[in-house]
């Protein structure tokens, strides 16, 4: 028969092992995945609500890069952005594309990421004297063909 003291000691040792394993990993890739599907030749307006206070601000630069794969050069499509400043949480980012922009993208499946760069370090902290850069979103970007486009 195992004594209560021995049983508690073993449980404590097991708990210490679990804690060491948990504490040995830090995931700095916190960008959520959001897959986007749009129709070629159509405009779109996508409001992304991060549902948590984000230091989003118009003084930072937001770049949505869309490419055939992670090794390919980004497409030359220009997306516009708007930060919703009217809310206390400041958690919303609007991504827009005109019909001309989506018309310039061949139908297919792409990958994208939305990066923020704050060169002034007035919203995000500078890291080692360099501008703060981070990925806010990533995922697939599918452009479906439209039968009305000749």
Image (spheres, rainbow, N blue to C red):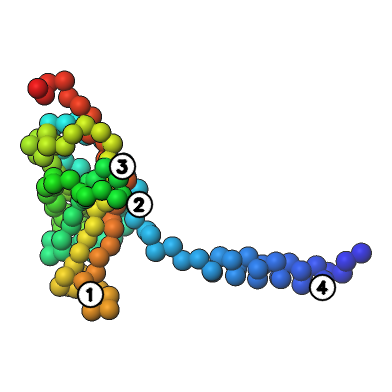
Q: CA distance from mark 4 to mark 2?
A: 45 Å
Q: Tell me residue 28's x, y (percent).
A: 39, 64
The local crowd at label 1, few if under 14, some if 14 to 19, many if 20 or more residues have their Cα within 10 Å, is: few
Q: First in sequence, mark 4 or 2: give its number.
A: 4
Q: CA distance from mark 3 to mark 1?
A: 29 Å
Residue for badge 3:
140
Q: How many marks?
A: 4
Camera-near label (3 vs 2) is 3
Q: Nearer the viewer, residue 7 or 135?
A: 135
Q: Residues within 10 Å of mark 2 (few under 14, many from 20)?
A: few
Residues marked 3 and 1 touching at CB (< 8 Å): no
Answer above or below: position of 91 versus 20.
Answer: above
Cα gap from disc 2 to disc 1, whole angstroms: 24 Å
Q: What residue is at 28 percent from the left and 62 percent from the top?
A: 134
Q: CA distance from mark 4 to mark 1?
A: 55 Å
Query: Farthest residue toward the left?
Result: 100
Give percent across and percent down for residue 4. Answer: 83, 69
Q: Quarter of the image for the N terminus: give it.
A: bottom right
User: Looking at the image, which residue is at 65% across and 71% down?
Assistant: 16
Residue under circle 4?
A: 5
The first of marks 4 and 1 along the sequence is 4
Mark 4 vs 3, N-terminal side: 4
Q: Is residue 89 visible?
A: no
Numbered label attached to residue 47? none
- Label 3 near label 4: C-beta < 8 Å? no
Residue receiving disc 1: 130
Q: Find disc 2 in the rendering and name its residue.
A: 32
């Amino acid at each position: 028969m195992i004594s209560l003291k021995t049983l508690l000691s073993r449980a404590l040792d097991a708990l210490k092992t679990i804690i060491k394993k948990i504490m040995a990993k830090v995931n700095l890739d916190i960008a959520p995945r959001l897959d986007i599907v749009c129709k070629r030749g159509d405009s779109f307006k996508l409001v992304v609500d991060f549902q948590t206070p984000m230091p989003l601000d118009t003084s930072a630069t937001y770049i949505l890069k869309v490419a055939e794969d992670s090794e390919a050069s980004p497409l030359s499509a220009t997306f516009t952005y708007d930060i919703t400043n009217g809310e206390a949480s400041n958690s919303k980012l609007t991504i827009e594309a005109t019909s001309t922009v989506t018309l310039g993208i061949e139908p297919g499946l792409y990958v994208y990421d939305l990066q923020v760069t704050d060169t002034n370090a007035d919203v995000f902290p500078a890291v080692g004297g360099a501008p703060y850069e981070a990925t806010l979103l990533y995922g697939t970007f599918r452009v479906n063909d439209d039968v009305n486009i000749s």
